Amino acid sequence: MAKDNKNPNKKPKLNPYWIYGIIIAVFISIQIFSGGFGESTGTQTTPAQFLDYLEQGQVDKIEIVNKREARVFLTKEAQTQAPHKNTTSKSIIPSVNASPNYKFEFGDLQNFEKQVNEVIQNNNLDTELVYETEHNVWGDFLLTLLPFVLIIGVWIFIMRRMSGGGGGGAGGQIFNIGKSKAKLFDEKIDTKTSFKDVAGLEGAKEEVQEIVDFLKFPEKYTALGGKIPKGALLVGPPGTGKTLLAKAVAGEAKVPFFSLSGSDFVEMFVGVGASRVRDLFKQAKEKSPSIIFIDEIDAIGRARGKNNMSGSNDERENTLNQLLTEMDGFGTNTNVIVLAATNRADVLDSALMRAGRFDRQIYVDLPDVRERQEIFEVHLRPLKKEETLDIDFLAKQTPGFSGADIANVCNEAALIAARKGKKSVNKQDFLDAVDRIIGGLEKKNKIITPAEKRAVAFHEAGHATVSWMLEHAAPLVKVTIVPRGRSLGAAWYLPEERLIVHPEQMLDEMCAALGGRAAEKVIFDKISTGALSDLEKVTKQARAMVTVYGLSDKVGNLTYYDSSGQSEYGFTKPYSEKTAELIDQEISDIIEEQYQRAITLLENNKDKLTELAEVLLDKEVIFKDNLEKIFGKRAFETPVLNSEEEE
Ligand code: ADP
């Protein structure tokens, strides 16, 4: 074959569709040709007409083809006579045999034979009657071919499907199934994230920056006999910026950066995961120094279980074992650093976490007030906001928000402002966005009867009153009876950011949560289903107090919490039936006690509660100031927030 490389652009590529096209064309032409050959020539006539000709002795031969069609050959004299002129074919292809003058379909063969024989005998004719079977060679050939064509077609279709629908055009990916799916970060194409885009997280940032440094100047560290760490594990709740940190490393480290997710190792075939790990490390070593980033590593790094009931964990264990050996096996002293992120460090296998593999664990926690402020600053950069916007205030209004939540608040605020047709985003838009993210969409047109509305108002006023009166309950920000999402009303609090929680704080919070139901009981003397989410929260909290934190006197300083997550699927309780009863009793006692406490508090302040509920019914939304008007200044200040203000 001549390989014309001079003009590569014009060289037609062999596209699979062409092949289909060619096959179809061949079929059609075969059909046409075979039709051309197979179709007999001769003028169409009727059986009655034919019998006439036969009677008159004009017929020389009758050919019965495939027991279906009769072809009539006339005698030489008859052919020259008037009605039969032009009946012979004028085929382009000269045929060896004489072609028939007439043809027709006779219907039933026996009947026809009888008729013909009768006429021949009666008239004493010497007309020949011959039988013939014609095969449509091409048609038969095609029929035998068809199943093969179908099977091959289906096979090609399945292959293309399995190879991922031709994404990227790398055909035949079925053979690449054991290859790693890691994406190599490309500085030129991918948007570059830098450490500047990561707000807060000072400690974590320093650690990963050092990792970048290790790879850039390894001699600096190895000169003193130190070894370059093999891996670092970023641990923290979702949305706190772990992936973002890794992206920043990719943008800043001027070395190849492979990124993939833990689930990329998983495939329906056994052994694929391990082979992908091997391939990933092989690629990374070829390009060393380099960084591998595995997001959500808990997908493969889960602790290897002992009670392998279903056997389905095998594949994951193989993958994990391969990862373990690649990270710290024989002769792995290459400059490949593995970064991994997870929010479930508690379930990871201990062999994975040991020094020598993930030497460093970098904890990425939810941001505190100051960090939130920095994150706001990063995400407010692209927004058109009012000059006077108080970022400090926004940071204080968003306790417990992760970086991702804050990014979302900023975006929502911009959308809300745009919906209102504003030129810039102001404080109220941000507050609306926060409300929306916590509570869901406002549903002003939800149908509520006045009685229900009254019940909701008293319920929320109950929460507000109790939390106002208790020292450790979170300070209130606002109360609303506008339905939002699935709730009919809500009380917004500004919880303190505590690192350790004391029992009295938990109890106060539970009391405040039960304040809603208590208010319904005190005012209407009946309770409702409206307290479902409160009860759920309180029950969980009480159970945690007793079984997780060991805060109950009767059960004692015990915990049934298993940080390894291995008992998650177990069917047995780690305690006896007797203890189970005790636990249930304790939980119920704690909750009942707090409920009674809330009731007593509200009984004593019934007038204020009613006043508050009336204001709420009137205004629908009330703030801290309204409460201060009714109750006077709150006796308990919030020391944590204040101390942060002072700093
Ligand atoms: P995860 O910790 O679950 O991997 P990501 O790193 O994917 O979370 O964070 C999601 C988004 O949240 C980021 O794309 C970014 O917009 C925002 N974000 C989170 N943390 C920060 C931070 N410290 N600074 C700036 N943006 C952040």
Image (cartoon, rainbow, N blue to C red):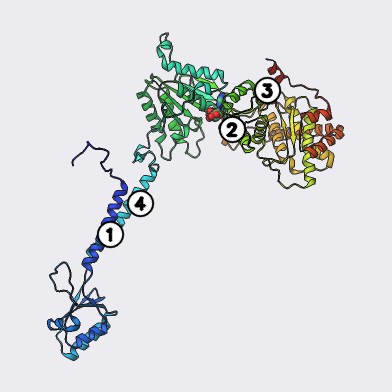
Q: CA distance from mark 1 to mark 4?
A: 21 Å
Q: Which residue is mark 3?
A: 498
Tell me the distance, in whole angstroms, between the alpha carbons under discs 4 and 2: 48 Å
Give the mark nearer the N terminus: 1 vs 4: 1
Question: Mark 4 — residue?
Answer: 154
What secondary structure is marked by label 1?
helix
Residue farthest along the top direction in this orientation: 224
Q: Quadrant of ligand 1?
A: top right
390 displayed left or right of 295: right
Q: Quadrant of residue 624?
A: top right
Q: Callout 2: few (<14), some (14-19), or many (20+) C-alpha neighbours within 10 Å?
A: some
Task: Please state which amino acid type lies under the numbered disc 4.
Answer: Val
Structural distance between the alpha carbons of marks 2 and 3: 28 Å
Q: Residue 458 sits in which quadrant? A: top right
Mark sitting on residue 411 = 2
Between the residue at mark 2 and the residue at mark 1, the CA separation in whole angstroms equals 60 Å
* Labelled pair 1, 4 in contact (Cβ < 8 Å): no
Q: Earlier in the sequence, mark 2 or mark 3?
A: 2
